[in-house]
Amino acid sequence: MSTGHILVQKSMNLQGEVALSGAKNAVLAIMASLLLTSGKSVLKNVPAISDVKQMIGILESLGVTILFDKEHNVLEIDTTSLDHNNIAQECVKKFRASFLVLGPLLTRFKDVKIALPGGDEIGARPLDYHIKNFIKMGAAIHHEDSFLYAHAKKLKAQKIVLDYPSVGATENLMMALVLIPGRSWIINAALEPEVLDLITVLQKMGASIEIVSPAMIKIDGVEKLHPITHTVMFDRLEAGSLLVAGAITQGDIYVPDAHVRDMDLFLMKLEEMGNKVICNKNGVGVRIKGAARQRAVSFKTAPYPGFATDLQPLMMIAQVVAHGTSTIVETVFENRFLHAPELNKMGADITASGHYAQVNGVKNLYGASVLATDIRAACALALAGLVAEGQTHIDGLLHWKRGYETLDQKLRDLGALLELCEGAPTVAKKVTPAIGAKKVERREL
């Protein structure tokens, strides 16, 4: 049975200025990192999304006291009474980032029992990158009945070479190594902006950690870390969602919080399509003016600074309504084209096999009932609904809520006909326009 759906009607020429929320992919790791400290920390710009709620549940089960001011997006976390023995396993099972508590708990308490995590259906995302390196550091690890048990009398500093620049593994290992005496290295490390935000947090805590060359992190273990105050980075993936919305609806959208450096290649591809992309000279703030006739472009996902895999579903819908044929190569996850057959239900012409997808642009899309299997697919299908004739019904509201705080309201403020509906659909419902949509100022940046 459906637990919620998204209704979208055709909405062209979205216009306005819109603020970004804090980054989901940054805040979850930062919340886990606070387990390395004892005392009260304050995080600002924290998005009120379901994944944050689940992480709060995990931390509270460990004896952490939490106060979340959702109105001002401020999270107070007091780890003074931390107890590692009662972790909320049901919360852990619900999303992949929950596994990030393993590194901090193992390095502090040397004994952890944790459920194997769940999350989006977009690939294996192996935990081996984490586990085999914890073993190399001196931990004994085994799993049974969907639980992982980790124990260590003593953890040792290590030179770690990752087989792949995994974001989760880089974060988990960094958090463990910062409290281990001696010098450690992580080679072939992920250096996504969200990883850099975590490094900034660890440095604020008193960790000796630095990037010494591309994809190499040096860590000198310290005895103790202290609480911090930190403002979480803005969500570059939400920025990408909004900019694609502006492009495909031939709109005019300004995102003042978007950091150009974090999404260079993505912006370049939007520009290649014929859209006008205007960036502030200080590198913060992006405006897009969607072209009336857009050209298809090909791209390949890769770890940062390559094209982000989380932006692939969003850029795919831009290719669906562009003129020409594009080829998309997905190198990060082996199962990340699940949105393609759903887009085909709406009239798209996509052939996907393995790591490759060919998209032949079409003139028109048509509203349909479709299924979202992950966070970015939910957004991509909603964006498709903005340019489709009729009404689009997307089953998968839970995925949307995992990753987006108020994106639905932000899109409505720009002029979109989009509504989030709890529970199973009953009768057909017409989406009504938002009142007082904010028009963008006609100024050059």
Image: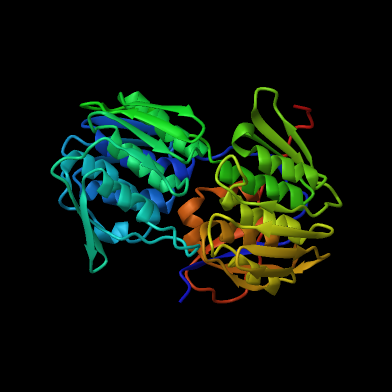
Q: Is residue 160 left or right of residue 110?
A: right
| Vertical position of residue 48 compared to residue 120: above or below | above
Whether residue 133 appears in this view of the structure is: yes
Can residue 68 be seen by looking at this rendering? no
Where residue 321 sits: x, y (%)? Answer: 78, 60
Residue 82's place in the image compared with 141, above or below, is above
Using residue 401 as the reference point, say whether residue 377 is left or right of it.
Answer: right
Query: Split into 4 quadrants, where in the image is the C terminus?
Result: top right
In this view, 358 is above or below 285: below
**Quarter of the image holding residue 229?**
top left
**Which residue appears farthest toward the left when viewing the image?**
153
Q: Position of residue 228 (x, y in %)?
A: 32, 27
**Quadrant location of residue 37?**
top left
Question: How far across and how far down the image is residue 97, in percent?
Answer: 38, 51
Q: Is residue 156 left or right of residue 196?
A: left
- Look at 23% across and 33% down and name the residue there: 180
216 relative to 162, above or below: above
Using the image as rendered, state which of residue 208 and residue 163 is in the foreground.
163
Q: Quadrant of the N terminus?
A: bottom left
Quarter of the image holding residue 370?
Answer: bottom right
For the point 74% across and 40% down, the residue is 288
Q: Whole-percent x and y of residue 33?
A: 32, 38
